[in-house]
Structures are given as structure tokens and as C-alpha cells.
Image (cartoon, helix red, strand yellow):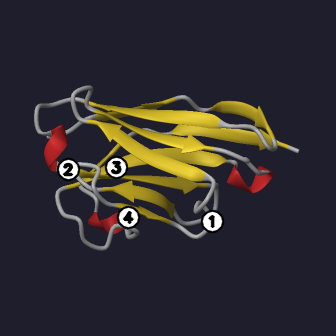
């Protein structure tokens, strides 16, 4: 069992940056691949980025490439999403999720555990 709590969201102007954090409970965090997704009302949950259990592999959505960096610190049971050059269309609730397999990492159905989300609002 893994419990996930996101933080770091907020209101930022276009062109600004935010770093989201996702703190995990449990001693098995380092066994999980971790992903970040986002969702706006009325739309499906959208993949942003994923990182393998040891940080050796990362994968980004095209919309995030060059603007986002996913990282993790297994000693702190935390995964991060650094987002730069933010755009109003990045406005969404951002979720982190845990998956025991590094498989179809862009598919939210693959993930076993989810956090409650943190709101990111980018003003123009």
C-alpha cells in the first residue's frame, strides 16, 4: 500500500515555474515507477511525465518535453515535477501516481495508487 500526497501547486504567471512534490508513505516507494498526470474538468486525465523506480529512465509527453523535469529522491520517498515556461493551457489539477511496472507509463489505467491532486493555475 502506498499513499501519495502532492504539494507545490498554486497560481503563477505565464512564463513562470513551479516545482510539484509528491510525498509517499510506506517502505516500498523505491519499487514503484512514478508518474505525473493532469486533468481539467470535462477532460480525460492526461499524462505528463514518468520516472522508473531508480530514476534511470524518464518519459515525457510531447507537451512537457523541454519544459518539465521529473526526478525522485528515494531516500525521501518523494518524486518531483519541475515545470518551466508555464502556459495558461498548463492549468489543471496535477496528480502523481505509482505503478509497480514500467510498462505503458502514459496510460493512467496502469497505475496502482493515486494522490488527491494539487491545483496549478497559470494566468496570462
Residue annotated with mark 4: 108
- Mark 4 is surrounded, within 10 Å at the Cα level, by few (under 14), some (14 to 19) or many (20 or more) other residues, namely some
Residue annotated with mark 2: 32
The first of marks 3 and 2 along the sequence is 2
Give the spatial CA distance, label 3 vs label 4: 8 Å
Depicted 120 relative to depicted 113: above or below: above
Residue annotated with mark 1: 63
Residue 97 tag number: 3
Give the spatial CA distance, label 3 vs label 2: 9 Å
> Is the C-beta separation of discs 3 and 1 under 8 Å?
no
> Is the C-beta separation of discs 3 and 4 under 8 Å?
yes
Give the spatial CA distance, label 3 vs label 1: 19 Å
Secondary structure at badge 3 equals strand
- Mark 3 is surrounded, within 10 Å at the Cα level, by few (under 14), some (14 to 19) or many (20 or more) other residues, namely many
Quadrant that contains the C terminus? top right
Q: Hey, which quadrant is residue 123 in on the image?
A: top right
Secondary structure at badge 1 equals loop
Amino acid at each position: 500500500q502506498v499513499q501519495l500526497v502532492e504539494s507545490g501547486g498554486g497560481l503563477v504567471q505565464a512564463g513562470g515555474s513551479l516545482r510539484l512534490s509528491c510525498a509517499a508513505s510506506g517502505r516500498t516507494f523505491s519499487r514503484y515507477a512514478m508518474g505525473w498526470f493532469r486533468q481539467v474538468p470535462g477532460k480525460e486525465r492526461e499524462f505528463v511525465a514518468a520516472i522508473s523506480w531508480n530514476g534511470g529512465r524518464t518519459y515525457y509527453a510531447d507537451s512537457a518535453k523541454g519544459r518539465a523535469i521529473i526526478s525522485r529522491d528515494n531516500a525521501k520517498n518523494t518524486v518531483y515535477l519541475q515545470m518551466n515556461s508555464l502556459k495558461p493551457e498548463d492549468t489543471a489539477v496535477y496528480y502523481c501516481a505509482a505503478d509497480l511496472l514500467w510498462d505503458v507509463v502514459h496510460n493512467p489505467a496502469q497505475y496502482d495508487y493515486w494522490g488527491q491532486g494539487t491545483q496549478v493555475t497559470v494566468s496570462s
